[in-house]
């Protein structure tokens, strides 16, 4: 994302006869960046960082490239955290850019006392580092006291992740084969969208951000003959959370395509992600206003690209709707990200090679799965004792 049409090199020339020498680059710079530059940087939510880089003597092109090192969602998150920190400093008449490390630690302690986790505190530190002036030649995040504080916060509040899934995959898949979600040619736009998003999330193991990056533009979505497979590619310029040297498409395999030998095969076909995707693409073409794969189905944003927050809500809605369709009480604490844990654990239990799971999910090593995603889906031997005999 650029810095806007007014953010051009010609308008942001930093040289004149009153230049000082920049300690960062040795180049001349104004004591403050031009007003137009500040306005442009504010437009992308990184005013302090961008203005500081411009004032240091860096060219507009260099500043724009540096700011693009973070994803838009990361810049937005850092801006929000930084505003909270500046507000905290403002109530204490302190300069958030040049305050001592003790003030940063007091702010972090207030967040820890408010119940925030170690991982959230690390985001606060990263946001402060992005805007705060170095202390003693080091960034705030590398200060020994800040490092020790984060280590202490981790000991005081270690992360706790569920080992048992909060929802049952078999219940959800069973519901996808019944009314509300079938037949796909007749169900509402809402439930067709929910079904397709959920099936793609489960079968691809992708993050919501990866799903948002998929496109229906020519050469970015292909169906194999007979709808036996589907190949989806992200939009140009998309950088995943864990970049790969060889970007891989999302490949969906059809489940039991027709003709069907029996009712079981027909039922499995109702869970087919390729079938749902084909139905969704053709249906959404009626109101689509963007080449992003998933677009909003209802007013006032009908046809516009769905945000990551919207996609996350759709995944959760699909799971809760499946329970509703099954006349079961909705599970508590369902999160869209849980589809990755559920699908990866199920695949691992089914004997899929771990490297294949990591490649599909975008994990750099199996350790990521073991530490953060593995769920216990095994059936204990004792469970068979209570099952009724089939003989």
Image (cartoon, rainbow, N blue to C red):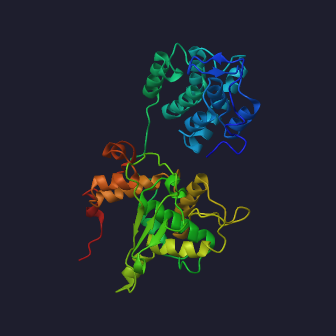
Quadrant of res 273: bottom left
184 shown above or below 22: below
Q: Is residue 336 visible?
A: no
Q: Position of residue 248 (x, y in %)?
A: 39, 57
Which residue is rendered at x = 50% and y = 76% of the image?
Answer: 178
Reply above or below: 360 against 262.
above
**Relative side of 356 to 156, left or right:** left
Q: Is residue 164 above or below residue 171?
A: above
Q: Position of residue 358 (x, y in %)?
A: 34, 51
Left-right relation of 215 to 15: left
Seen as rendered, the residue at the extreme right is: 35
Q: Depth check: give the residue in front, 105 or 78.
A: 78
The residue located at (61%, 54%) in the rendering is 307
Residue found 47% across the figure and 61% down from its top: 233
Q: How many marks?
A: 0
User: Can residue 124 be seen?
Assistant: yes
**Residue 117 appears at what percent x and percent y?**
51, 33
Left or right of residue 8, residue 338 in this image: left
Is 205 positioned to the left or the right of 190 in the image? Answer: left
Query: Compared with residue 164, is residue 77 higher up or lower down, i.e. above or below?
Result: above
The quadrant of the image that shows the C terminus is bottom left
**Is 330 or 175 nearer to us in this picture?**
175
């Amino acid at each position: 994302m650029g810095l806007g049409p007014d953010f051009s090199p010609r308008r942001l020339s930093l040289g004149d006869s009153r230049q000082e020498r920049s300690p960062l680059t040795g180049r001349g710079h104004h004591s403050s960046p031009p007003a137009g530059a500040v306005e442009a940087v504010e437009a992308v939510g990184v005013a302090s960082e961008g203005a500081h880089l411009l004032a240091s003597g860096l060219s507009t092109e260099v500043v724009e490239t540096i700011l693009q090192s973070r994803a838009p969602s990361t810049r937005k998150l850092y801006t929000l955290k930084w505003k909270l920190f500046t507000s905290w400093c403002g109530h204490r008449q302190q300069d958030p850019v040049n305050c001592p490390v003790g003030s940063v630690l007091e702010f972090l302690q207030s967040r820890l006392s408010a119940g925030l986790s170690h991982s959230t505190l690390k985001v606060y530190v990263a946001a402060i580092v992005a805007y705060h002036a170095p202390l003693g030649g080091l960034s705030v995040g590398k200060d020994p006291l800040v490092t020790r504080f984060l280590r202490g916060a981790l000991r005081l509040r270690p992360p706790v992740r569920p080992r048992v899934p909060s929802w049952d995959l078999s219940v959800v898949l069973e519901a996808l084969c019944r009314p509300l979600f079938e037949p796909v040619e007749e169900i509402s736009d809402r439930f067709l969208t929910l079904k397709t998003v959920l099936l793609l999330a489960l079968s691809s193991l992708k993050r919501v951000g990866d799903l948002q990056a998929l496109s229906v533009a020519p050469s970015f979505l292909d169906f194999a003959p007979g709808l036996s497979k589907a190949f989806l590619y992200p939009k140009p310029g998309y950088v995943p959370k864990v970049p790969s040297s060889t970007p891989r498409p999302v490949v969906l395999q059809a489940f039991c395509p027709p003709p069907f030998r029996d009712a079981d095969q027909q039922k499995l076909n109702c869970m087919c992600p390729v079938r749902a995707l084909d139905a969704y693409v053709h249906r959404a073409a009626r109101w689509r206003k963007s080449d992003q794969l998933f677009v909003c189905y209802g007013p006032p944003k009908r046809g516009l690209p769905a945000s990551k927050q919207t996609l996350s809500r759709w995944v959760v809605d699909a799971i809760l709707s499946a329970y509703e369709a099954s006349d079961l009480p909705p599970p508590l604490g369902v999160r869209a990200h849980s589809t990755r844990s559920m699908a990866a654990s199920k695949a691992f239990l089914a004997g899929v090679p771990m490297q294949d799971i990591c490649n599909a999910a975008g994990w750099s090593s199996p350790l990521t799965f073991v530490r953060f995603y593995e769920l216990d889906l095994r059936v204990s031997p004792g469970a068979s004792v209570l099952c009724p005999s089939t003989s």
